Image (cartoon, rainbow, N blue to C red):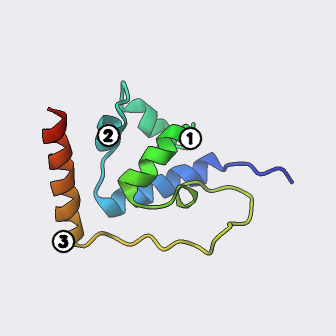
Amino acid sequence: MFPVINKRETGVNLRRIMDMRGITPKDVQEYLGLGCVQSVYRWLDGVNVPTVDNLYALSELFQVPMDALVYGNRAPFAPDIVIKQLDSRESRLCAYYEKLNEMRAA
């Protein structure tokens, strides 16, 4: 059988990870430099899936491998990856890192 991405399940998974990380669709839009937030909502609704470039960037933002973002009909290469919620220390470090990058870019 040819491997196919399940758009609906991928969207549900993206929403779950975003909720665990406290990331909003607007945050994703700004991080990826998208023109409008509607693209992110279309991913979450299972209408579309992110491009490979966007999946790569999302894996960095969410701190998970790309394979953990996409659901499909093939068997996973690795066992299920447990996506844990960031603790307050990790959240503060991520926020600090983002601020440093903003200051460097300015």
Q: What's the residue type where badge 3 is placed?
A: Arg
Instruction: Name the side, left or right, on which 70 lies relative to 60.
Output: right
Secondary structure beneath disc 2?
A: helix
Q: Secondary structure at mark 3?
A: helix
Instruction: Choose between 33 and 21: the one closer to the eye.
Output: 33
Total number of numbered labels? 3
Counting residues from the start of the chain, the first of labels 2 and 3 encountered is 2
**Mark 2 residue crowding within 10 angstroms, few (<14) / some (14–19) / many (20+):** few
Cα distance between the residues tagged 3 and 1:
30 Å
Residue drawn at 38 percent across, 72 percent down? 84
10 Å crowding of disc 3: few (<14), some (14-19), many (20+): few
Image quadrant containing the C terminus:
top left
Report whether 43 appears left or right of 105: right
Residue highlighted by disc 1: 52
| Residue carrying label 3 | 89
Residue 87 showing in the rendered view = yes
| Residue situated furthest top in the rendering | 35
Callout 3 touching callout 1 (CB < 8 Å): no
Q: In the orientation shown, which residue stands out farthest toward the right?
A: 1
Mark 2 residue type: Tyr
* First in sequence: mark 2 vs mark 1: 2
Circle 1 packing at 10 Å, graded few (<14), some (14-19), many (20+), is few
| Residue 50 shows in this picture | no
Name the residue located 87 percent from the left edge and 54 percent from the top edge: 1
Quarter-of-image position of residue 74:
bottom right
Q: Residue at x 34, y 31 (%)?
A: 33
- Helix, strand or loop at disc 1? helix
Which residue is found at the position 45% from the left and 32% from the top? 39
Q: Give, as a three-letter code, the residue at label 1.
A: Val
Mark carried by residue 31: 2
- Find out whether the residues at labels 2 and 3 contact each other: C-beta distance under 8 Å: no
Q: Point out residue 14 in the picture as x, y percentages from the top left corner.
A: 47, 53
